Amino acid sequence: MITTYAYSSRLKVLLFILLSSSSCYGYYLPNTNCLINIRKTSRVYLSDKASDSNDDERYKKEAEKSKTRLDRVMRWEHMFGLLVRFKEREGNCTVPYNHKEEEENLGAWLYVQRELYKKHTLVAARQQKLDKIGVFEPLENTNKWDQMYNLLKKFQEREGHCNVPRPHQEEGKKLGNWINTQRYNRKRDKLSKKRQSDLEKIGFLWEKNTENWERMYKLLSNVKERDGKCDVIALDYTEAGENLGAWLGTQRSLQKKGELDKDRARRLEKLGIRWMPYNNSLTVRWEYMCNLLAKFSEREGHCDVRQNHKEEGIALGRWLTAQRARKLKGTLGESRTAKLNEIGVAWTSEDKENAKWENMYEKLVEYQRREGHCNALQTGDSRMLGIWVRKQRQLRKKKSLSKECERKLDEIGMEWDPYFKRYVQWDTMYSRLAQFQEREGHCNVHRSHIEEGERLGQWLSVQRYLKNAGELREIRQQKLEEIGVKWDDLGGKRQQQWEVMYQSLLKFQEREGHCNVSYSHVEGDMKIGSWLCRQVYAKNDGKLSELRERKLDKIGVVWRTKRKKVKT
């Protein structure tokens, strides 16, 4: 029989609580577990008499500690009972933080339990009890999740799938963002099995590109059934309008990085896909790049690909640079070297220059066959060819052109003097100018004028240039002067413009009585102020003709002389 000390009334109370029924002071208290726990931790030893006074004090302190622990246990059970009542009434355990139940702050208490659960410091028995009533099933709002789930069901019924775009909103709710959140929570094991199952029931796919992957996989299976193999296909291979080769290359790249899903890798291996075809994953890509280079060569007529050039979105220029570097190091195989040689790849800078020259020479041959001469214009479609022809003439003049190149150009009728025969025979153009003079009464041909398909204006400008440079033959100069060609172009467009400005200045002089025109003055549409200033500068520099000077003197133009700086 267990007895107590006569003077220890507090210990009597403690024993009364321990041995009483499950209901004590209005708290719910499980019998056996708590009793055993307190007995193990408190170490309260009861006997018929005390050994000494020190033991008596120690027993008192341990009894008080046991009472404190018991109070905590009873309070937790009391708060749990309030939470159960809230769940029965509201249907969920989403208690707001400031909510009070029977004057007890139930929301704050539940928040503490969840924090302990997150930190893995909640007692297992308490965790089981809370989990049983659904406290930890969703940490987010259950009603909100169900609402978004119903919106997803409506979307699926209407569209036939659950592939919601990220910016999509359904009835004002950001359904696309919510979908991505569910995928994120599932990857981190924060989404309950029940919710995963609910989403999968309506056809929700956890991977965004699952449909596309399955479609490409089916096409690959069809290739396997038809051809008996699908392991090695070119990167540009297409099946049913889809770039199946590029897709398979992407799967190999993902597998190499360790990012390909294991189930997908297993399915591809089952079809017979080898991750390193030909024991070298770069073989297929090299062949593909070689084909791109061949296409470039057919289109452009050479293999001189720029470093930053891309062909069909692929960096062909960098790839070709890498092949040249391997060739220089001796690491490019003979078969690959031979294949690139067939396409016409130039390996050294000298080879590249020779290849460029041959390419331009072929274009000049085609131009000569089409036009009947080699005087390609440096404008329009033949601009680059015209520049190249001019460069060859300059090299020959400097004696820097090789004999072989000069011989080949002579064979197709290259004219090394571009001034004597610019476009067609000189005599032909002279006859065109004579016809123009007979019809118009003068030889002031505008530079852009074309006579019977020939650029007569440009040809006449060239003759004036040669005359001023002292390179025009005397006999040709005489023939041109006989039909009225003026070398300083006084009767041309510039002279006409000068005369118009002069007449405007004359009107100003008649109206104002002088020619003191301000620099910014405009007469009609004519800026005669700036024009007169240019005439003064030309007079001071000795560049104004005597005829023009006399005409300006006649109307009273005052020539301002340059001021001399006086040294002080």
Image (spheres, rainbow, N blue to C red):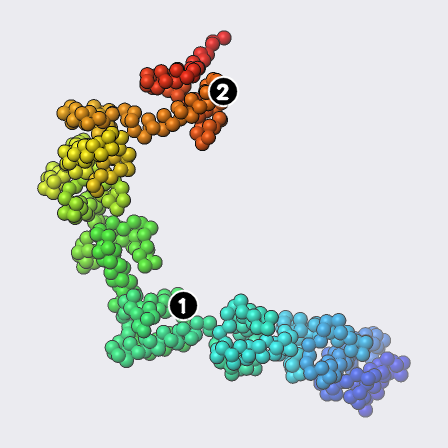
- Residue at point 16% right, 38% down? 424
Q: How many marks?
A: 2
Apparent side of residue 351 relative to residue 308 in the rendered image (left or right): left
* Quadrant of the rendering where the N terminus is positioned: bottom right
State the residue lying farthest toward the right.
7
Apparent side of residue 563 relative to residue 311 in the rendered image (left or right): right
State the residue lying farthest toward the bottom.
1
Name the amino acid, label 2: Glu
Apparent side of residue 108 relative to residue 317 in the rendered image (left or right): right
Q: Label 2, secondary structure: give it.
A: helix
Give 20 or 562, whichever is nearer the viewer: 562
Circle 2 residues within 10 Å: few <14, some 14–19, many ≥20: few
Q: CA distance from mark 2 to mark 1?
A: 92 Å
Which residue is the site of mark 2? Answer: 512
State the residue lying farthest toward the top.
568
- Residue at point 79% right, 85% down? 18
